[in-house]
């Protein structure tokens, strides 16, 4: 079977004014989902965390928590100091994915699936360029989408919607008015919106970029918009400067999707996760198994493998491995990593899997499509690789725990399901298909954290 491809490119440098983009940005998404699902949390300062404990890090704060100064990345202990009424809520990723699917289905009810592009778990683009005769009033359409979300999902799930001729300004519009915002930026009103913003309020402009612009004599967003293409090339370096010039003049350079270049699995470790060598090794097995599942779903094998670990009392430890033979199997990944760890420890290095470990991660990359993998004449891996694909097909149809590998039974539930704000490609069978990856929508009752 061929690799699942997500490539799509609808960029345009014509700037003819006919393009129409809607950007949907969910407000305080994980926290809002929890408040919708658990009514007793509504109106309270909550923070969604990977696990419960004073060292747990907030990955999403509710509006009430944000009003108290609580921000993403803060430790639970810091949040409690700022707000004694702060409530820590453990993540439930399968619920957030299910609600994401409901939101995508609402958007897809207004246009073809290929014109709805999920950018992350809480953001999506709707390309309405081919629907301008269908929807004469795009602001009314946006209001209807908001109403659909309220009535079909819940009143605590809100979004900010931005509308413009390109993705850049549509996304900027969602940043200007939160929560539950709705703004349409046009060439006629853009300067009015920009005049109230700092350079660092612009998506993609950080402190360093702002400093470079300042050195070139650009201090305001209006000056940025009026900067020449040659000046922006000097500030940002070559083609990146061209892209900024195009964005600022309503041309499209951001309406695309791409295939995976790498996949990663990382977990912050609770006290229980790092309580013993066996617990840490089980976590490593779980990370490898998670990447195996992702590669099987995407019909790819990896040719490069990395492992890293961060510690409370020591520098990072990491290793990068170039593989002679492409692989997909979790236990093969584990063997390569453990071999490198053993070599390091054999020659006097500190033990890698130890109880002061803060987090660990595994990364795979340099992919090759499953049907392009070359097997040796007497290689028995072909049968094992086919069996692995069959196993995940059964999991999809009958439940993820209906059939299990031996590696999944070693301290099963050691690795709690996790979710980030990045790509959601794993959730989709293909970008143009209405089918979703049921494996990720199923609750795993054995996940203990």
Image (spheres, rainbow, N blue to C red):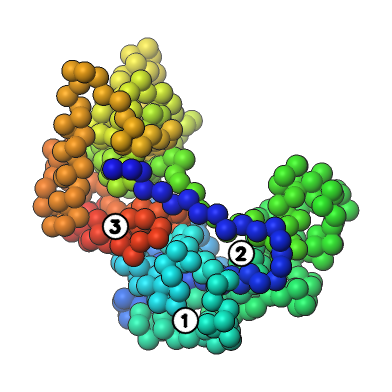
The CA span between labels 3 and 1 is: 24 Å
Q: Which residue is mark 2?
A: 167
Neighbour class for label 2 at 10 Å: few (<14), some, many (≥20)?
Answer: many
Q: Are marks 1 and 2 in contact (CB under 8 Å)?
A: no
Q: Which residue is mark 3?
A: 437
Q: Which residue is mark 1?
A: 145
Q: Quadrant of the N terminus?
A: top left
Give the image location of residue 272, x and y in percent: 27, 46
Q: Is residue 35 left or right of residue 334?
A: right
Q: Are marks 3 and 1 in contact (CB under 8 Å)?
A: no
Neighbour class for label 3 at 10 Å: few (<14), some, many (≥20)?
Answer: some
Neighbour class for label 1 at 10 Å: few (<14), some, many (≥20)?
Answer: many
Mark 1: which secondary structure?
Answer: helix
Q: Is residue 331 left or right of residue 114?
A: left
Mark 2: which secondary structure?
Answer: helix
Q: Residue 65: in sight, yes or no?
A: no
Q: Is residue 174 left or right of residue 199?
A: left
Q: Earlier in the sequence, mark 2 or mark 3?
A: 2
Quadrant location of residue 444?
bottom left
Q: Earlier in the sequence, mark 3 or mark 1?
A: 1
| Residue visible at 82% across and 44% down in the picture | 234
The CA span between labels 2 and 3 is: 27 Å
Q: Is residue 253 left or right of residue 435?
A: right
| Residue visible at 40% across and 24% down in the picture | 321
Give the image location of residue 174, x and y in percent: 59, 72
Q: Residue 249: in sight, yes or no?
A: yes
């Amino acid at each position: 079977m061929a690799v699942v491809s997500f490539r799509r490119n609808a960029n345009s440098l014509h700037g003819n004014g006919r393009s129409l983009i809607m950007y949907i940005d969910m407000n305080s998404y994980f926290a809002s989902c929890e408040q919708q699902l658990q009514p007793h949390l509504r109106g309270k300062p909550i923070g969604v965390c990977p696990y419960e404990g004073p060292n747990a890090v907030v990955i999403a704060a509710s509006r009430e928590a944000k009003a108290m100064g609580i921000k993403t990345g803060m430790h639970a202990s810091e949040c409690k100091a700022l707000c004694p009424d702060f409530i820590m809520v453990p993540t439930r990723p399968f619920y957030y994915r299910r609600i994401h699917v409901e939101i995508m289905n609402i958007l897809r009810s207004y246009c073809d699936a290929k014109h709805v592009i999920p950018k992350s778990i809480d953001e999506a683009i709707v390309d309405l360029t081919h629907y301008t005769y269908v929807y004469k009033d795009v602001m009314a359409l946006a209001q209807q989408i908001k109403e659909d979300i309220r009535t079909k999902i819940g009143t605590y799930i809100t979004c900010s919607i931005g509308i413009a001729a390109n993705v850049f300004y549509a996304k900027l519009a969602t940043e200007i008015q939160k929560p539950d915002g709705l703004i349409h930026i046009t060439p006629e009103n853009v300067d009015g919106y920009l005049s109230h913003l700092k350079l660092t309020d612009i998506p993609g402009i950080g402190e360093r970029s702002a400093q470079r612009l300042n050195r070139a004599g650009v201090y305001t967003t209006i000056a940025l918009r009026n900067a020449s293409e040659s000046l922006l090339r000097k500030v940002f370096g070559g083609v990146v400067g061209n892209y900024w010039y195009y964005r600022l003049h309503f041309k499209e350079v951001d309406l695309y999707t791409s295939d995976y270049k790498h996949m990663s699995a990382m977990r912050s470790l609770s006290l229980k996760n790092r309580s013993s060598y066996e617990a840490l090794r089980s976590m490593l097995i779980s990370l490898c198994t998670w990447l195996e599942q992702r590669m099987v779903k995407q019909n790819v094998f990896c040719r490069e493998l990395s492992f890293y670990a961060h510690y409370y009392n020591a520098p990072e430890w990491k290793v990068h491995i170039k593989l002679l033979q492409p692989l997909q199997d979790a236990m093969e990944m584990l063997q390569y990593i453990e071999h490198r760890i053993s070599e390091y420890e054999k020659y006097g290095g500190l033990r890698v899997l130890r109880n002061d470990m803060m987090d660990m991660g595994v990364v795979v990359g340099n992919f090759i499509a499953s049907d392009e993998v070359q097997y040796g004449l007497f290689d028995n891996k072909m049968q094992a690789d086919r069996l692995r694909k069959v196993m995940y097909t059964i999991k999809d149809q009958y439940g993820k725990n209906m059939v299990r590998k031996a590696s999944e039974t070693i301290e099963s539930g050691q690795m709690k399901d996790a979710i980030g704000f990045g790509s959601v490609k794993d959730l989709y069978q293909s970008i143009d298909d209405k089918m979703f990856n049921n494996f990720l929508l199923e609750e795993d009752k054995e996940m203990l954290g």
